[in-house]
Image: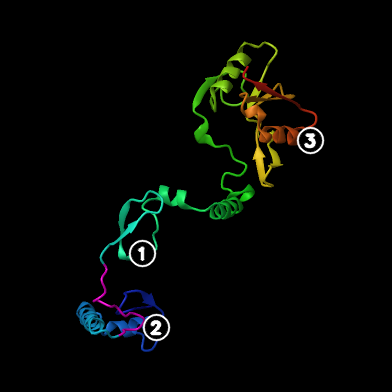
Amino acid sequence: MLKCENCGKYHDGSYASGRFCSAKCSRGFSTKSNRKEIGKKISKSIKIKLLNGESVGWAKINFNLDRSNIKKICPQCNNEFEVSYYKTNQVCCSKSCSAKNMSIETRDKIRKKMIGINSGNKNGMYGKSPKNTKNIEVFSKKHTGKKVFNVRSSYEAEFVKRINRNELISKFTYEPKQYKVNYIDNLGINRTYQPDFLINDNEVIEIKNSWNSQLDETHIKEKYFRTQFPTITYKILIDF
């Protein structure tokens, strides 16, 4: 094995005389010692050409062009604001004003686009429970999983306390994964849903307040659950 005189890597000597491992190292060796000096000379010559208005490859810079900030009037709040030369297409002074200035047609286009990108199994949270919303810690010896766990609302926390006092309930599971439901919402988007509680392996309890219980989404979930799991009793508790 031979050692390349340029990069120091070992090679089989198949390239040329064997001094270098490749054509790249062979060409670079002669300028390696004064590479920085050569680079400075090239950079200086390019700058001189550009200052004289000449083109260098694809680059041509007009150094006499005024690139100072541009003053504009925001069409939403009527305040004056400045944008840099490179942001001349900016219309509004802020993101909030830009959102307010957006037409209904543009909003609908963006909404439909985002729904298409993030809906159903395209969404990174598809089939998963949002863990960051479980912020109330509860305890129950009857829980089939961990005895200390987190629930999503004060209603659910209160229901766990009631389970602990109810002698007719021997065990329960919070958000049972085996009863995950695939359903289609009003917009025709594929979604997943997990019920709140499975009681004694034969009854599902969904905890809702009076407002949520009236939503179409709630009734759609119930309909799909009863269709997919006809042997399991399904109940919705409202403001208990």
Q: What's the residue type where badge 2 is placed?
A: Gly
Let me know if residue 200 is in the magenta part.
Answer: no
Q: Residue at x 30, y 82 (%)?
A: 28
Earlier-in-chain disc, 2 versus 1: 2
Q: Of residues 57 and 23, which is closer to you in this image?
A: 57
Dot 3 or dot 1: first in sequence order is: 1
Q: Residue beneath label 1, please?
A: 88
Label annotation for residue 13 = 2
Tell me the distance, in whole angstroms, between the alpha carbons under discs 2 and 1. 57 Å
Question: Spatial distance from mark 3 to mark 1, Cα to Cα?
Answer: 57 Å
Applied colour scheme: rainbow
Q: Is residue 4 left or right of residue 12?
A: left
Q: Position of residue 151 (x, y in %)?
A: 55, 26
10 Å crowding of disc 2: few (<14), some (14-19), many (20+): some
Q: Which residue is mark 3?
A: 227
Q: Looking at the image, is 135 positioned above or below residue 104?
A: above
Name, please, the residue furthest toward the bottom.
Answer: 17
Q: Position of residue 33 (x, y in %)?
A: 21, 80
Percent position of residue 99, x then y: 46, 50
- Magenta range is 55-67
